[in-house]
Image (spheres, helix red, strand yellow):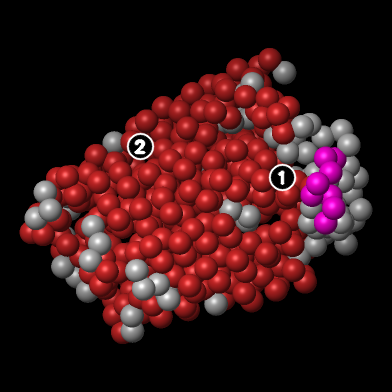
Amino acid sequence: MTTQPAEAGAASGTISQTISPARANYVLAVLFAVMMLNFLDRQIIALLAEPIKREMKLTDQQIGLMTGLSFALVYTAISIPLATVADRWNRSRLIAIAVAAWSIATVMCGQAGSFAHLFLARIGVGIGEAGSGPGSHSLIAALFPPERRASALGILGAAIPVGSFLAYTGGGFMVQYFDWRTAFLLAGLPGLVVALLLWFTVPEPRGSPPISAIFVRTPGAPTFRAAVGELVKIPAYWHLMAATTLISFISYGLAAFTAGLVVRVHGISYGELGLKLGVMVGLTGFVGAILGGRVGDWLNRLRPGLALHSVVLTMLLAGPGMIAAVYAPSANLTFLLLAIPTFAATAYFGPTYAVIQKLASDTNRALAVALFVLPSGLIGLGLGPVFVGTLSDAFSGGIKADEGAGLQRALGILGLFYFWAAFHFWRAQASLTKRASLT
């Protein structure tokens, strides 16, 4: 069996072992499970928001704070330090610790007796999940050659809608037949099993750096300031960061209130809501991520960065699709039209992150991802739900009968941000084309 050399990732300048393609695919499968649980535990609160709101007597603004800002504050604060650890230490061990931490915090969400308690538990989920993303991207870049990275990262991105599917369908079933506290408990427990799987079966391509490597900069590796300085000089990096931040702002704002929209406007049950929303998100998002990655690899072989043209097109279609979904006359038509922005929200993943890994150097891959997603966490996840919730409260004027119409107006405005994201993807493509012509 032939082996595939792993690229130098960080702490060690040499590779202490080789990873076969079959082993690389196994690692990708485990990381798929990690990302799936990441979004299951992150998104299940969106489906549970309405019953939590009624039980705890919360406002939509508090729902936005609980679903987004509480998570994002700590996620963004510690993602860069943890990315530095990932660039220097054993990435699989770090991800295992992160999965265990956020799984325990998810279980604690189900024990909350007040808004403050739930807010703090969500902060705990953010602490754990900050340690998984950059390390996962770095591992995939080390295990897969550039011509296969968009597809591999697309597969990783496909875990997002699968996790959301489980959050919506499982959460809807739990609320319908049990309660929201049981939903949090069952969402958190599987992560402890996956953490053990990571710890004992996923190899680190650069060997097993000692824990002391966390505190020692790799010889020849740039300092933090120098690494950031390298990225500052790449316009495409910043345009892609802006575009991704806008997509996160839209996606998390929409996700936090989709259940509320359908329940308030169309009055369907939580069981029906969870099943239909989960199937739509899972199927459409999965296809978007896989297709986006494969098409991205094919287009990029024709010309570096060409895949971003297809991303621009999906963004231009997503805005009108989302607005039409928000004002659709029936729940079924709402779910059908929401497939358009859901497809767009995952199709960009593989092409975009493949470009980021190509722009980064071998010694700062995790850091490049952590910096890249920093505004997505703080602005997208942190403020997207708050933005929608605040507008919804303002439009409804605190009148319960107007809550549905107020939320529709807020989400309709949010859909316009897709055009802004399309502009930044277009500018990133133009920058990459210019960069390629100069090299």
Q: Kindly tell me whether residue 64 is visible in this rendering.
A: yes
Q: Residue at x 62, y 74 (%)?
A: 192
In this picture, residue 270 sits left or right of residue 303: left
> Magenta segment, which residues?
211-218
Q: Which residue is at a point 37% across and 58% down the rendered structure image?
A: 66
Tell me where residue 263 appears, x and y as whole percent: 20, 65
The reply to whether callout 1 and callout 2 are in contact (CB within 8 Å) is no
Q: Nearer the viewer, residue 335 or 376?
A: 376
Q: Quadrant of the C terminus?
A: top right
Q: Amino acid at mark 1?
A: Thr
- Report helix, strand or loop for mark 2: helix
Mark 2 crowd level (few <14, some 14–19, many ≥20, 10 Å Cα): many
Residue at label 1? 84
Viewer-nearest residue: 413 or 129: 129
Measure the C-alpha gap from mark 1 to mark 2: 32 Å
Q: Quadrant of residue 37?
A: bottom right
Q: Splitting the image into 4 quarters, where does residue 305 fall?
A: top right
Q: Which residue is mark 2?
A: 418
Q: Residue furthest bottom?
A: 177
